[in-house]
Amino acid sequence: MDLTITPHRLHGSVRTIASKSMAHRLLICAALCPGPTTIRCATTSKDIEATIGCLEALGAEITREGELLHVTPLAGSPATDNLRQARPDATLDCGESGSTLRFMLPVVAALGCGASLTGHGRLASRPLSPLYEELLAGGSDLSEQGAFPLHVGGRLRAGRFELPGNVSSQYISGLLLAAPLLGSPSEVRVAEPIQSRPYVNLTVAALAAFGVDVVETHESVDGRPHTCFVVTPTTPYRSPGTVEVEGDWSNAAFWLAAGALSDEICVSGLDLASRQGDRAVLAALAKLGARVARTMGLATVSPGAPVATDMDVSDFPDLVPPLAAVAALAPGTTRITGCERLRLKESDRVETVVAGLAALGADIRAEGDDIVIVGKDELAGGTVDAANDHRIAMMAAIAAARCAGPITILGAECVDKSYPTFFDDYRTLGGVVTRA
């Protein structure tokens, strides 16, 4: 689906969608605990549905009733509550969701049920090392990585898993989600610094909601600091009965950035004390000169005196597309560092951010893994290939408000991955969108 946007200021209020990052985690926890759980999750997306589909393939039952997801977990062992019995040799379709793949892989390994994991788009080529090697060392049998289906056999043993901190935090989260199933104490030891650490904190919070206590300690190994996350079998999964998926800061960031570019926009349904790393969008927009306000679950951003700045996005790489759009219209030179992980997303997001904004007339370039932007007063407009990346399509849409001419987004349906109603909300805020 190709869409054309006629430049128009965006203004008004919008409610954020449910956080897919937290939805993944809560759904997996709910499927692995002894009793049923009701999850309040007001919205869905292809990524959330991928995780639901994988859990159903393993034997969980998940039904939707309005905003509620009712989860009947995997069958349990009569011997112990923390040992689940999954359907053997199931096929799990992870869609294009990296989180689903990297969480379900260690969970399936811990269940010892055997399974085949598959997916679409760039998912097969997105890296799994060193998680892959740690699972092999822990007793799992895995087919060659880099191609689907990825076959998983054997059963993961409890013990120590070691990871560098400069790889995907999803590896850490996946092992933590699997640890309560292993029957003995397990430790995930990670060399510091840990990139995207807030996402690990989200996992720890989800586990805590389901009664699993993660003990964090710190130690030095060969003179280098490490963080150790320890899970013991004395804290198996327990259903809280009902739990709610909080609002999504990652997607709310596009509306907040649009407020910096256009006119005042208020986003409701946000936890201002959230562990989500993308809550940093408010501080980043303030650095770029926007006016920011926070009150009781509401975040409001309006244009201020735009200014270029330098920022390290190691802990919140998903914010680069909206922040780059704002920086493209802020006088001076902005350098965005810490972008290495962006090359491993749904697209090579360093290249697609640069290509997308350049197609609209921005002065932007990649220097290694950094993105350098020289701001302008206005962009020209043009055609942007979304590259099957939801965040590139949304970036182009908010930048359109400051373009002299219309823009066309090729493959705009990719927003369904995380935010199927994005263009509906865009129109609510005054956006003018037609099919190309």
Image (cartoon, rainbow, N blue to C red):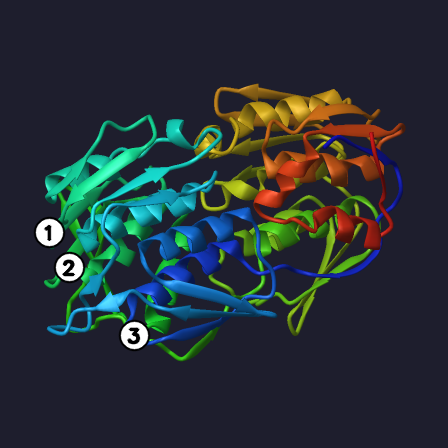
The residue labelled by disc 1 is 157
The residue labelled by disc 3 is 211
The residue labelled by disc 2 is 182
Q: CA distance from mark 3 to mark 2?
A: 16 Å
Question: Considering the numbered disc 2 on the image, is that residue within a helix, a strand or a loop?
Answer: loop
Q: Give whichever of discs 2 and 1 has the lower sequence position.
A: 1
Q: Nearer the viewer, residue 137 or 73?
A: 73
The relative height of residue 272 versus residue 427 in the rendered view (above or below) is below
Disc nearest the viewer among 1 and 3: 1
Q: Position of residue 223 (x, y in %)?
A: 15, 42
Question: Considering the numbered disc 1 on the image, is that residue within a helix, a strand or a loop?
Answer: loop
Q: Nearer the viewer, residue 295 or 82?
A: 82
Relative placement, left or right, of 160 versus 255 is left
Q: Nearer the viewer, residue 326 or 404?
A: 404
Question: Considering the numbered disc 3 on the image, is that residue within a helix, a strand or a loop?
Answer: loop
Question: Residue at horizontal 29%, vertical 57%?
Answer: 177
Relative placement, left or right, of 152 versus 343 is left
Question: Residue at horizontal 79%, vertical 45%?
Answer: 305
Q: Residues within 10 Å of mark 1 (few under 14, many from 20)?
A: many
Question: What residue type is disc 2 on?
Answer: Leu
Residues tagged 2 and 1 counted as in contact (Cβ below 8 A): yes
Q: CA distance from mark 2 to mark 1?
A: 6 Å
Q: CA distance from mark 1 to mark 3?
A: 22 Å
